[in-house]
Image: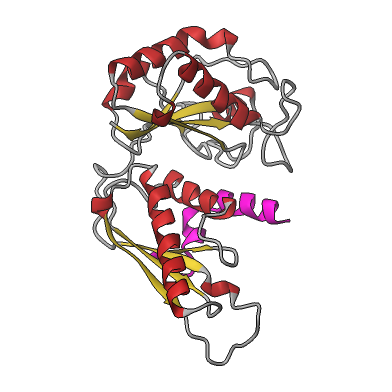
Amino acid sequence: MRRLLCIFILLLPSSVLFAQNKDTVTLYFELNEKVLNKHSQQKIDSLVYNDILYPGEHIMIIGYADYLGSGRYNEELSQERAKNVQAYLQQYGISKENITLCIGKGEIERPNIKGNEGYAADRKVDIVIGKKQRSTSTKQKIVQTVPKSDSKAAAPQKHTGDLIDIASYKPGETFVLRNIYFPAESHDISGSRKTLDKLYNILLSHPTLKISIEGHVCCINGYPDAYDIDSRDNNLSLNRAKAIYDYLVDRGIDADRLKYYGFGKSKPIVAVERTEDDAERNRRVEIRILEK
């Protein structure tokens, strides 16, 4: 049930995600945990993907704890929670300069609430997004086009462009890696070596470039990811991203320069697939610039 809830949240439009407070996003933590759980990571992923959070945005990160534990312990725990959120945001190119505040405020006092289980709603980090005017020049670039035959498409397709252009992108911007071919239900990359060699050469010639490899699949319902006949698990988008990651590392690219993620069908370009073209638009590998 929790997994289905996570998927549902990822598919919500940005207006729904911000229904309660247009400027604050809340991430929740388990008891005594300071590391982001998968649900919180996916929520941040969705905010970045929907252009709610992006490089250049001014934000504040404020951590909290519930009343369990000593005052000092709760202060340290809330601070670590805030720092871990900051670190995760930095993976998307959001720099420390744009994080105007990152603090832990310790426990939230609840004098009328007692017990050994604490108060789960207070184990959280608030991300407060600044109200400055958002310039299109600072937003992450996801160049998009709409086919002339379908000007009312549910979501525009991301422009693939020329692979060599990837080096000119800014942190946080994405690029759909075209000419990557996988056999059905497989993460075999043997048919895509030419394109992967181009990506390898770009990374080789730009030694400070860091990227995230992000896999997406189509045509599934009721599951977070598709079945992979090679590994016999339901992690097809993740396995495809990792196959590209492994190929680059095997060729000599430093693993510290690469990250990989599998998003399944949680971030479709076309909400409802009715044609093979719709499926092809959702079935993709994206490259996100992390650092240059």
Q: How many numbered marks are there? A: 0
In the displayed orientation, state which residue is furthest to the bottom: 112
Q: Nearer the viewer, residue 152 or 175?
A: 175
Q: Is residue 162 visible?
A: no
Above or below residue 203? Residue 1 is: below
The one nearer the camera, 112 or 264, is 112
Instruction: Judge from the rendering whether residue 227 lies leftward or rightward of residue 153; answer left or right.
Output: right
Asked whether 14 falls inside the magenta stretch, the response is yes
Q: Is residue 33 above or below residue 279?
A: below
Query: What is the x, y in percent for residue 61?
Result: 36, 62
Give residue 37's quadrant in the image: bottom right
- Please state the extent of the stretch shown in magenta in the rendering: 1-24
**Quick check: 247 left or right of 201?**
right
Q: Is residue 142 above or below residue 109?
A: above
Quarter that holds the N terminus: bottom right
Residue at the spot 70% in from the left edge and 35% down from the top edge:
220
x and y percentages locating residue 186 in the rendered image? 68, 20
